[in-house]
Image: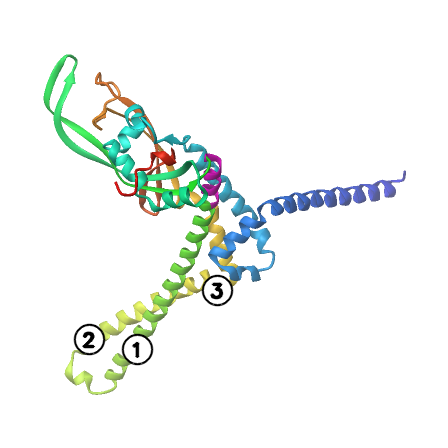
């Protein structure tokens, strides 16, 4: 083989390898897209349907949607298995005992939730799995405590209480509940993208209105300067006011340029959706909580000799709000009669 033939063979081999590599990447992307297409379309429906007019929008949303789903799976793995609320759970399970002050409170929470009653009545289900959210409060009190064998009075204590119990997304199994939570996490992020877009629209509108008002004030002040106003007021004061208005207008126009660039085209709308999906931790977090408490709801030091139980919980944080979250399970018979 001559040198020329060897060179040509090398070039052709390189081109073939390059083409095969890109073909493999294309096939992998098509397989990912086939799996995630429905999720992407749901995101678009919720956030901004017009971004379907953007060329190759499915491909542009593929990576961020995959990231958001992976983050949702990460959050769900941190949620412990469902806690049983029925039967003697309030007396036997320290978590249930901590969540509800009395067994009657537990039965009231289950029995007076219309979503749960509807769930059991519609399909004649015998067991329900749901997400329970609560507000945790820590209240400082003073009381008696054991120090070794001695009873000490006026000891600073922290009382843990849970309130505002709410039950969501009743399902027939824990697996189906977790799948629904996964889907709802994605929709939550899409809704946040929609809210972000609306915030940018509102900011742009406010800046346009502010610019209009400043322009009106400047025209009025300059008009007065050409009339009799100099005879009635200080020229220096008017000049200072004119300079201040000019400065405010210049800053407003700079801010307006930035605001318009953020939503200038449909590609910009798509980019806002991408940014939210790519940073899901900014909008939803789960933190593990562990504490040792006694049957009276008092928080105990880990080294305390007082009898107590260590319970592990998760705290959901989103948009400045925090809630304790727990998956729960209970039977139809655990619901108190509606008349109770």
- Do tag 1 and tag 2 residues touch (Cβ < 8 Å)? no
Q: Earlier in the sequence, mark 1 or mark 3?
A: 1
Residue that mark 3 sits on: 264
**Which residue, as the protein is rendered here, is positioned at the far right?**
1
Residue that mark 2 sits on: 236
Placement of 109 over or under 189, stated as above or below: above
**Which residue, as the protein is rendered here, is positioned at the far left?**
153
**Which residue, as the protein is rendered here, is positioned at the far top?**
149
x%, y% of residue 174?
45, 35
Q: Residue 216 bears which disc, if any?
A: 1
Q: Secondary structure at mark 1?
A: helix
Magenta range is 174-183
Q: Secondary structure at mark 3?
A: loop
Q: Is residue 260 left or right of residue 311?
A: right
Q: Quadrant of residue 154?
A: top left
The image quadrant where one finds the N terminus is top right
- Number of the front mark, 3 or 2: 3
Q: Secondary structure at mark 2?
A: helix
Q: Residue 118 bears which disc, if any?
A: none
x%, y% of residue 209?
34, 71
Q: Main secondary structure of the magenta part?
A: helix
- Do tag 3 and tag 2 residues touch (Cβ < 8 Å)? no
- Number of the front mark, 1 or 3: 3
**Which residue, as the protein is rendered here, is positioned at the far bottom?**
227
Q: Residue at x 74, y 46 (%)?
A: 19
The answer to whether any part of residue 279 appears in the image is no
Q: Residue at x 52, y 62 (%)?
A: 50
The image quadrant where one finds the C terminus is top left
x%, y% of residue 96?
30, 30
């Amino acid at each position: 083989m001559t040198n020329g033939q060897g060179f040509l063979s090398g070039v052709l081999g390189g081109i073939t390898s390059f083409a095969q590599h890109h073909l493999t990447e294309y096939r992998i992307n098509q397989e990912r897209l086939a799996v995630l297409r429905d999720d992407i379309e749901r995101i678009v429906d919720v956030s901004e349907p017009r971004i379907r007019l953007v060329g190759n929008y499915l491909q542009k949303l593929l990576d961020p949607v995959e990231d958001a789903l992976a983050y949702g799976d990460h959050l769900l793995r941190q949620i412990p298995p469902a806690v049983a609320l029925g039967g003697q759970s309030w007396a036997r399970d320290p978590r249930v005992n901590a969540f509800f002050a009395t067994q009657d409170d537990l039965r009231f929470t289950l029995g007076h939730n219309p979503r749960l009653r509807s769930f059991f009545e519609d399909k004649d289900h015998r067991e329900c799995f749901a997400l329970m959210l609560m507000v945790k409060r820590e209240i400082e009190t003073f009381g008696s405590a054991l120090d070794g064998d001695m009873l000490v009075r006026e000891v600073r204590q922290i009382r843990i209480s849970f309130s505002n119990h709410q039950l969501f997304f009743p399902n027939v199994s824990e697996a189906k509940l977790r799948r629904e939570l996964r889907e709802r996490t994605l929709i939550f992020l899409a809704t946040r993208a929609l809210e972000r877009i609306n915030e940018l629209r509102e900011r742009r509108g406010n800046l346009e209105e502010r610019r209009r008002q400043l322009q009106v004030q400047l025209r009025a002040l300059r008009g007065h300067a050409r009339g009799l106003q100099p005879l009635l007021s200080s020229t220096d004061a008017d000049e200072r006011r004119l300079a201040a208005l000019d400065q405010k207008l210049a800053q407003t126009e700079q801010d307006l340029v930035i605001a318009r660039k953020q939503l200038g085209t449909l590609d910009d709308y798509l980019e806002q959706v991408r940014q939210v999906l790519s940073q899901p931790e900014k909008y939803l977090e789960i933190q593990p909580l562990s504490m040792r408490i006694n049957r009276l709801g008092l928080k105990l030091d880990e080294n305390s000799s007082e009898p107590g139980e260590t319970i592990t919980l998760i705290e959901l944080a989103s948009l400045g709000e925090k809630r304790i979250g727990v998956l729960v399970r209970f039977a139809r018979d655990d619901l108190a009669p509606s008349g109770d």
